[in-house]
Image (cartoon, helix red, strand yellow):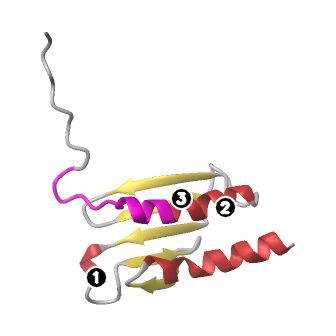
Amino acid sequence: MGIVTPFPQQRQPGQVGFDRAELTRILDLYGRMVAAGHWRDYAIDLGRDAAVFSAFRRAAERPEFRIEKRPALRNKQGMWALVGEAGAIVKRGAELGPVLAPVERRLMKLVEE
């Protein structure tokens, strides 16, 4: 028949990434912010130290929020961090839900207006 070529590995060894449940939660929030007309673009950066989801109001500026997953901080401050546009950490924790809470509260304010 034909030669079957194995599919290349999706992640490099030692590379940090989001699992399906985490990415679903993040993209759900992103979709609601897009529907509210607040966010227009996003970027995902997968590195050795961290996986970062960046949400932009416009494509040509700094991200309004970055959601960072740093497994090395799991036992210290928590591996999840919500970083604002200026680079300040807005919220840090061990669970994704509470870290996303400030953005979800902002979404509620956007919908009410």
In percent of width and height, residue 23 lies at: 44, 60
Distance of label 3 from label 1 (alpha carbons): 22 Å
The label shown at residue 32 is: 2
Q: Which residue is painted at 63% across and 57% down in the image?
A: 31
In percent of width and height, residue 86 lies at: 58, 74
* In contact (CB < 8 Å): disc 3 and disc 1: no
User: Around disc 2, counting alpha carbons within 10 Å, would you say few (fewer than 14), some (14 to 19), or many (20 or more)?
Assistant: some
Relative height, residue 34 to residue 104 (above, below): above
User: Around disc 3, counting alpha carbons within 10 Å, would you say few (fewer than 14), some (14 to 19), or many (20 or more)?
Assistant: some
Q: Amino acid at mark 2?
A: Arg
Tell me, yes or no, if residue 29 can be seen here: yes
Tell me, yes or no, if residue 63 can be seen here: no
Q: Which residue is painted at 84% across and 74% down in the image?
A: 112
In percent of width and height, residue 14 lies at: 18, 60
Callout 2 secondary element: helix
Distance of label 2 from label 3 (alpha carbons): 9 Å
Distance of label 1 from label 2 (alpha carbons): 28 Å
> Is 58 inside the magenta-drawn segment?
no
Residue placed under numbered mark 3 in the picture: 27
Horizontal side of residue 39 vs 85, given as left or right:
right
Magenta segment boundaries in residue numbering: 12-25
Callout 1 secondary element: loop
The label shown at residue 74 is: 1
